[in-house]
Amino acid sequence: MTSPLLIETKGSVRYVTLNRPDRHNAFDDGLIGELTQAFLAVEDCRAVVLQSTGKSFSAGGDLAWMKRMAGNSPAANLTDAKALSGLMEAIDTCPRPVIGVVQGAAYGGGVGLVACCDLVVASDSASFCLSEVKLGLIPAAISPFVVRAMGGRAARRYSITAEVFTAATAQAFGLVHEVMGADRLGEVRDAWLAKLLANGPKAMAAAKTLIRRATDDPLDGTLRDWTAARIADIRASDEGREGVAAFLEKRKPIWVEG
């Protein structure tokens, strides 16, 4: 039986691949659990690529799974919904940079997966849709991540119209960073990976936490004190000292491969 999730490590890069092309890479409770674990266990890599096989990136929730859950108790539905929210949180807060490669349609929860990636390259033929209201549902678990990625105004429009929007439109919102022909997605992905592997691993993890908190917290004395403490700590860290020394000595820092 073909695995619905492929996980492969090449060098210091982890490739996490949705592999249900016959179901447009829709996810159910089992795949949500596997994906969550994949993003929680990244200690032995430096970057993660989230991608998929087939013509679609992800159609979001599997309809058979959602139909099954509709017949369950409110408590079981709440547990299930929290698992999906946990998956989004695991990707969003992954201590390694996450690159999303979107070769085709991203619908419903698939948009949530995209929103949680740090860097996203999409095919110029990719399409996006917050399709939940067509089924009488709402994009609840993914909404905090989607709103942060594409902005509240755009999220309001597309979550109530369920309009399909293009990769170019997604780029204009900031949901997607680069739009390329399908044959160039790997080129962009690899260029980003080269940049990421040249950077301090701990610094990148700290930068992700920094930007998330700077985005969400009020700009007050508490936030300013926290940011000052973060740079003070990192300057004095082993990685911080090594990075500055390498720059001054005109050499590569120890974390650069090769």
Image: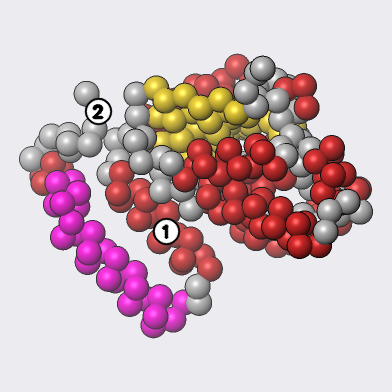
Provide the residue span drawn in magenta.
Answer: 219-243
Residue 103 location in percent, x, y?
A: 66, 26
For residue 41: magenta? no
Decide whether the magenta segment is chiefly helix, strand or loop.
Answer: helix
- Answer with left or right where residue 60 lies relative to residue 225: right
Residue 79 location in percent, x, y?
A: 69, 57
Amino acid tagged 2: Glu
Element carrying mark 2: loop
Residue at x 46%, y 66% (from the top left corner): 213
The disc label shown at residue 100, or none: none
The disc label shown at residue 257, or none: 2
* Other-residue count near label 1 (Cα within 10 Å), few / some / many at <14 / 14–19 / ≥20: some
- Answer with left or right where residue 217 lies relative to residue 131: left
- CA distance for labels 1 and 2: 24 Å
Residue at the spot of label 1: 209
34 and 224: which is toward the camera: 34
For residue 230: magenta? yes
Image vertical order of residue 17 relative to residue 167, above or below: above
Image vertical order of residue 91 relative to residue 258, above or below: below
